[in-house]
Image (tube, grey):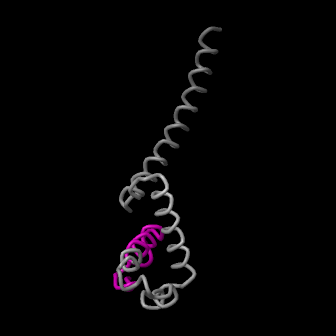
Amino acid sequence: MDTEIAGLKVPLGGGSHVAEASVVHDRAQSRCSASSDRFRSIAEVARDLGLNDGLLGRWVADERRRLGAASQTGQEPLTAAERDELARLRRQVAEQEKDIAFLKKASAYFAANHQR
């Protein structure tokens, strides 16, 4: 079952809600960055996109913070793909840190039992 949000078919049910939200967010972000949308209110753009204006307002605030932080450091802001990759890598590092902690405990256990 699909629905159309922000001019994009989004699968509903049986899929990842995070992925669905990400698709809608990326589509809304690209629409909001169009020059004609810069002079419209968040409520007006949200209505056109079929989104809640509070949600779109949070996305706009997040985007402004992201761009502001990048301009303060003199760097280019990360793209959506780069942010996704960064999040994936952070999850991977966290998982590997858990594995390392487990292996340290296991090796200490076997080392203690081997010497008896």
Quadrant holding the N terminus: bottom left
Residue placed most toward the observer, 109 or 51? 51
Q: How many marks?
A: 0
Residue placed most toward the observer, 1 or 24? 24
* 33 relative to 49, above or below: above
Q: Quadrant of residue 113?
A: top right
Name the residue at 43% across, 73% down. 25
Q: Which residues are magenta?
A: 1-27
Could you tell me residue 98's position as x and y percent? 55, 38
Q: Is residue 82 magenta?
A: no
* 35 relative to 104, above or below: below
Could you tell me residue 92's position as x and y percent? 46, 45
Could you tell me residue 45's position as x and y percent? 45, 87
Q: Quadrant of residue 84?
A: bottom left
Could you tell me residue 66's position as x and y percent? 49, 62
Name the residue at 48% across, 91% down. 44
* 74 relative to 65, above or below: above
Name the residue at 55% across, 74% down. 58
Name the residue at 43% across, 69% down. 22
